[in-house]
Amino acid sequence: MPTPPASTPIRVTRYPLLPVAFAAAGLLRIGARAVDATRLDYVATPLATILVIAIAWTDPGDEGDSYRRFVLAGLVFSLVGDVYLMLPGDRFLAGLVAFLFAHVSYTVAFTRDGGFTGSPVVTLPFAIGGSLVMTAILPGIGDVALPVFLYALVLLTMAMQAVERWRRHAHAGARLAACGAVAFTISDATLGIARFAGGFPGSDLVVAASYLTAQYLIARSSGARWLSRQRAAQVS
């Protein structure tokens, strides 16, 4: 294996108990919201995101890799968004802005391999799905219609870029990132329907489960990408 330059130290430490702790925190978050345990939710919600940040940070990778940095940035913005959305009062717009920056960060990460690309086979399903959700929530969206529309546009762009990387076989982590991005669209679409269109039975569970799945898969995509590149360099 080629020796990396001294200026770009390699993190190879991995803590196998971190995913277990994340899963436990995620279950606590889901349970807290199911039984309306506010204090437990205040602990479990940020804890789950902090743990997934720790997973991304300690997975194998190059500290100077821009993909890794932007994934971490997206996770940190997500933590800010989580805190805003769980606090008392209506901080929806502040949380929306935090997650918008998270998706911008993820989009930058996903375009590290092949640049900004698009294809009808990927774009059309997301465009149709996004249009259907926006049509469903538009009557109840009120004064935040423009911010929600811009957020949805950024979210769908992020997801399309992730799926494009997978379709083009950009790297081993692309599959994880794509599945995580799709899970994020499911989570946010469900959240929008729950908030602006009355929701449906079990919508809170769908939002939480798909959100936690999304963040975990995106976080793990960075280490998988790095490892696949190291193996390819070793073979060559």
Image: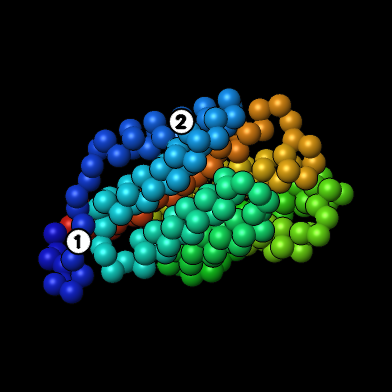
Please give the label number shown on residue 10: 1
The residue shown at (23%, 42%) is 15
* Figure colour scheme: rainbow
The residue shown at (13%, 72%) is 6
Reading the chain from its start, which is encountered first: label 2 or label 1?
1
Counting from the top left corner in percent of width and height, residue 148 is at 72, 58
How dense is the environment of label 2, judged by Cα within 10 Å: few (below 14), some, or many (20 and up)? many
Counting from the top left corner in percent of width and height, residue 199 is at 74, 35
For the residue labelled by badge 2, is the local secondary structure a helix, a strand or a loop? Answer: helix
Q: Which residue is mark 2?
A: 28
The residue shown at (26%, 51%) is 58
Determine if residue 166 is in view.
no
For the residue labelled by badge 1, is the local secondary structure a helix, a strand or a loop? Answer: strand
Determine if residue 101 is in view.
yes
The residue shown at (14%, 64%) is 2
Counting from the top left corner in percent of width and height, residue 103 is at 54, 60
